[in-house]
Amino acid sequence: MSKALEGVKILDMTHVQSGPTCTQLLAWFGADVIKIERPGVGDATRGQLRDIPDVDSLYFTMLNANKRSVTLNTKSDKGKEIFTKLIEHCDVMVENFAPGALDRMGFSWERIQEINPRMIYASVKGFGPGPYEDCKVYENVAQCTGGSASTTGFDEGPPTVTGSQIGDTGTGLNLALGIVTALFHRESSGKGQRVECAMQDGVLNLCRVKLRDQQRLAHGPLKEYPQYPHGTFTDEVPRAGHASGGGQPGHVVKCAHRGGPGTAHGAHGANDYAYVIIQPQCWEPLMKAIGREDLIDDPEWATPEARLPKLDDCFALVEGWTITKDKYEVMEALNAVNVPCGPILSMKELAEEQSLRDTGTVVEVDHPERGTYLTVGNPIKLSDSPSDVDRSPLLGEHTDEILREIGYGDNEIDIARTDGAI
Ligand code: CAO
């Protein structure tokens, strides 16, 4: 079976997280991703948050699987010449430098089109055109400017950032879709095009239910929010705590620790919780499961409308039962009666979960300097196109190999190296 993107050549000028997420995804699908890094320095993440001295960090290795690394100083004359050949050689160029960096290097979109009219040129920036277009942006800045932080956390607390890298990885996913769409369009047009994704736009897109709620506010309080009916609403969407963003109420409820109280693990663990959702048709089975058959037809509780003003009390009832079971038992018991719920899983639990290893969502790979490490695999599964995960490259591991592929001889490679271009 061939890989879906076999034959597609990507000139990867990305660094840190957002851009590398995109090109890693394309590499998993079989694209030949040629990562360009500054000689002697490389992607800054190689050295960030290192757990083992002098070895590429997990930050880097988990974002750059299946790529080939070339060290190239694209600001030197020889480097520019090599870079121009790489633009001719590749189908797609991806970058996520600070605004204007590629233009300053002498590679504007106009120049890239002159070199290779079929080139697809894809970029991530913090913001789209507007007042902030020249600003540098990292993940949490995007979460804050895209609407996620203002709507995450508890009413009484400050705006909160999430552990999901929605600004970086989220935008990387958008960029990947933009690239394959442009590749598809090139089949008929014969031409490349520019693909641009702003992190603020990506986060806002993921926060659409909150933009929905901003408009709903004009017509009254948001009844599924914990502020209803006790608190007050302003003219801005408040932080909703654990409340569900959908039409069905849900909440985090406490569970017993696995093994139960009185065991070696008697203390309540940080992640001994489950999330439970109450669809209207689930009231009866849920009440049966928790032993409160008396509430099934009680007009004070029986309908979604009756429960809405007292969702806190409602989930306290559920918690009275979940606290007697561990989160896996809650999952099993409630799913058996079709009540949607899920255990709060820690990173430790996810890393150890065999089913995620079986599907290739979590993968163990070998690295010549760090040994074995865990990384994420492709979360998108195609039935006829395999997607293997290989280790990330060492800095400049493939420089000579790739220069030869684009026509350089050993002598020229030596000269480029002496010049400091590679
Ligand atoms: N050869 C020579 N020079 C190179 C090079 C190479 N192979 N690769 C990069 N450079 C140069 C760039 O041209 C740039 O030089 P100039 O400033 O002279 O134009 C310089 O290295 C550094 O680039 P940068 O400004 O992008 O890097 P930074 O660390 O200061 O900023 C970041 C990092 C992420 C804030 C910024 O790149 C950015 O805002 N990117 C867009 C948004 C984004 O993707 N953010 C996600 C980051 S992950 O949280």
Image (cartoon, helix red, strand yellow):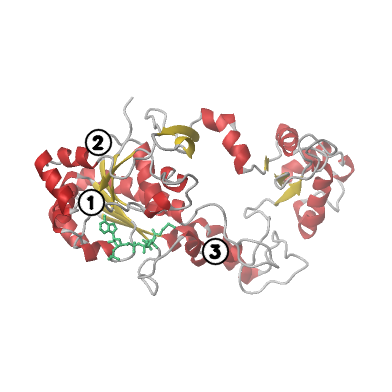
Give whichever of 240, 262 is nearer the camera.
Answer: 262
| Residue 74, horizontal then vertical, whole percent | 21, 56
- Asked whether disc 3 touches disc 1, contact meaning CB atoms under 8 Å apart, the reply is no
Compare marks 3 and 1 and give the one earlier in the sequence: 1
Is residue 409 visible to the viewer in this orientation of the structure? no
Disc ID at residue 7: 2
Q: Distance between the residues labelled 3 and 1?
A: 44 Å
| Label 1 crowd (10 A; few <14 / some 14-19 / many >=20) | many
Q: Quadrant of residue 133?
A: bottom left
Q: Give coordinates of residue 194: x percent, y percent.
A: 27, 56
Q: Tag 3 or tag 2, which sits nearer the N-term?
A: 2
Q: Describe residue 290's horizontal placement relative to residue 328 as left or right.
A: right
Outermost residue, top side: 1
Depth order, front residue of 376/294: 376
Position of residue 294 in the picture relative to residue 305 (left or right):
right
Q: In which quarter of the image is the N terminus?
A: top left
**Secondary element at image label 3:** helix
Mark sitting on residue 72: 1
Amino acid beneath label 1: Leu
Name the residue at 49% across, 67% down. Answer: 145
Q: State the residue position of label 3.
A: 211
Q: Which of the labelled discs sits on residue 95, or is there none?
A: none
Residue found at x 68% / y 56%: 243
In the picture provided, is 127 more to the left or to the right than 166?
A: left
Q: Position of residue 59 (x, y in %)?
A: 45, 48
Residue type beneath disc 2: Gly
Assess mark 1: CB under 8 A from ligand 1? yes
Q: Could you tell me the amino acid type at mark 3?
A: Leu
Q: Quick one: label 2 or label 1, which is nearer the N terminus?
A: 2
